[in-house]
Image (cartoon, grey):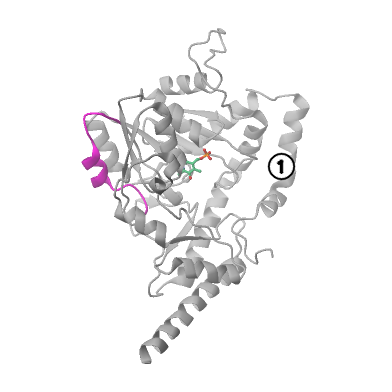
């Protein structure tokens, strides 16, 4: 049975911008511009401008953006890289593949890195830190940057979920040595398949990533300077992403408006926490709208029965996936979050009606739960 309220709506997304997207694809194919052409250069310069940095280099995923940025920071075997336990596995896989040791720390109640935990985890071997701007909210970068600078630790931002979000009016991906973005189809700026980018003000980082993404070859001289990889952002993708980047500010506004509607509808329900954190230095882009309750699994089941699609990011801590070979770092907040979070439908296509339906289903759930608890207590 199809959902009454889908989590995202890729068909509607395409329908709304079909003529522009179709033109970009046809134009690129007609010109035969498949690899490393003008469309990629244009997108990279527009992206750099949007983020507020000098350079953007397109690669084929955020995973590769992270991996190449770590290599550019000189990270390798014997080093430690600090990041959070509450993130997508790719953040940690990128560290592991450099040969360095991932050191996982806990998050605060806004789901982002706790600066105290970061500072406490630093050792003489710490080479880099990867703050993850989760759900479209930038980490408290003032403290992280200041401490990292003092200790000469490279800051690489995992900004996969935060393109367009800001902290103190500075864009996600513009704070550290490098910013890493994903254009996976369901990110705020989603492509036709996998895609990503590194943003930086450092010409050496930009140069190294440019070499690494295409077999280590210096395209001017034909010299192979490294054993690189094959990880380009495809030219057709770049042409489509460039079209979509023009719409992104409106899409973010829509997400923020949708978050406001959820807030109005769901405020003051006992046992339910909403993702609104009072600190006006942040401008959140709401990649996800994550709510939190101890009866998450029951709520999710209820919403499923009512035709509302939700997701859980993520249902168990990374270290419980035995195949990853990670030690249990003992992070109580991350563990609680895994049990309690649920993401409600949220995209540039989420309608007012979608929110109303979702809100009333959530309200019904908590009302009938309160009633049955009272009945049980009255016996
Ligand atoms: C999506 C995501 C990634 C990985 O992005 P890919 O482009 O799929 O490699 C990394 N980190 C976070 C926080 C993400 O949400």
Placement of 274 over or under 93, stated as above or below:
below
Q: Quadrant of the C terminus?
A: bottom left
79 or 265, nearer to the observer: 79
Residue 278: percent from left, percent from top: 34, 60
Please check the rendered image and state whether residue 119 is part of the magenta-colored stretch, yes or no.
Answer: yes
Quarter of the image that includes the N terminus = bottom right
Query: Is label 1 in a helix, a strand or a loop?
Result: helix
Specify start and end residues of the magenta stretch as a single range. 110-127
From the top left corner, tell me how far across and down residue 283 is, in percent: 41, 51
Which residue position holds label 1? Answer: 20
| Magenta span contains residue 206 | no
- Answer above or below: position of 340 versus 205: below
| Nearest the eye: 29 or 69 | 69
Where residue 298 sits: x, y (%)?
A: 48, 70
Tell me which corner region of the image, top left, top right, bottom left or bottom right, holds residue 30.
top right
Residue drawn at the location 62% of the way across and 61% of the way down: 6
């Amino acid at each position: 049975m199809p959902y009454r309220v889908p989590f995202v709506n890729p068909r509607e997304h395409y329908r709304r911008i079909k003529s522009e997207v179709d033109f970009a694809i046809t134009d690129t194919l007609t010109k035969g511009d498949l690899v490393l052409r003008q469309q990629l250069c244009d997108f990279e310069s527009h992206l750099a401008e949007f983020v507020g940095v000098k350079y953007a280099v397109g690669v084929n995923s955020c995973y590769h953006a992270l991996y190449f940025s770590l290599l550019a920071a000189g990270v390798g075997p014997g080093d430690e890289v600090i990041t959070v336990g509450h993130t997508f596995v790719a953040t940690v896989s990128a560290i592991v593949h450099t040969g360095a040791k991932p050191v996982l720390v806990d998050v605060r109640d806004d789901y982002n890195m706790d600066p105290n935990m970061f500072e406490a985890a630093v050792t003489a071997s710490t080479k880099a830190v990867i703050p993850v701007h989760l759900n479209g909210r930038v980490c408290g970068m003032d403290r992280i940057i200041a401490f990292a600078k003092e200790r000469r630790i490279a800051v690489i931002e995992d900004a996969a979920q935060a393109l367009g979000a800001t902290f103190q009016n500075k864009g996600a991906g513009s704070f550290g040595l490098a910013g890493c973005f994903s254009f996976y189809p369901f990110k705020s700026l989603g492509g036709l398949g996998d895609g990503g980018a590194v943003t930086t003000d450092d010409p050496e980082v930009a140069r190294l990533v440019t070499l690494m993404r295409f077999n280590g070859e210096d395209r001017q001289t034909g010299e192979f300077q490294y054993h690189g990889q094959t990880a380009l952002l495809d030219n057709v993708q770049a042409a489509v992403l460039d079209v979509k980047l023009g719409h992104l500010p409106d899409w973010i506004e829509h997400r923020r408006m949708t978050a406001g509607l959820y807030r109005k509808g769901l405020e003051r329900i006992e046992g339910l926490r909403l993702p609104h954190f009072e600190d006006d230095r942040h401008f959140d882009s709401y990649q996800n709208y994550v709510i939190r309750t101890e009866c998450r699994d029951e709520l999710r089941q209820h919403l499923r029965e009512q035709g509302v699609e939700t997701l859980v990011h993520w249902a168990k801590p990374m270290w419980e996936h035995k195949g990853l070979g990670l030690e249990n770092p003992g992070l109580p907040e991350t563990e609680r979050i895994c049990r309690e979070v649920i993401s409600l439908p949220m995209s540039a296509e989420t309608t007012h009606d979608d929110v109303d339906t979702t809100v009333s289903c959530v309200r019904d759930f908590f009302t009938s739960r309160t009633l049955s608890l009272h009945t049980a207590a009255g016996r």
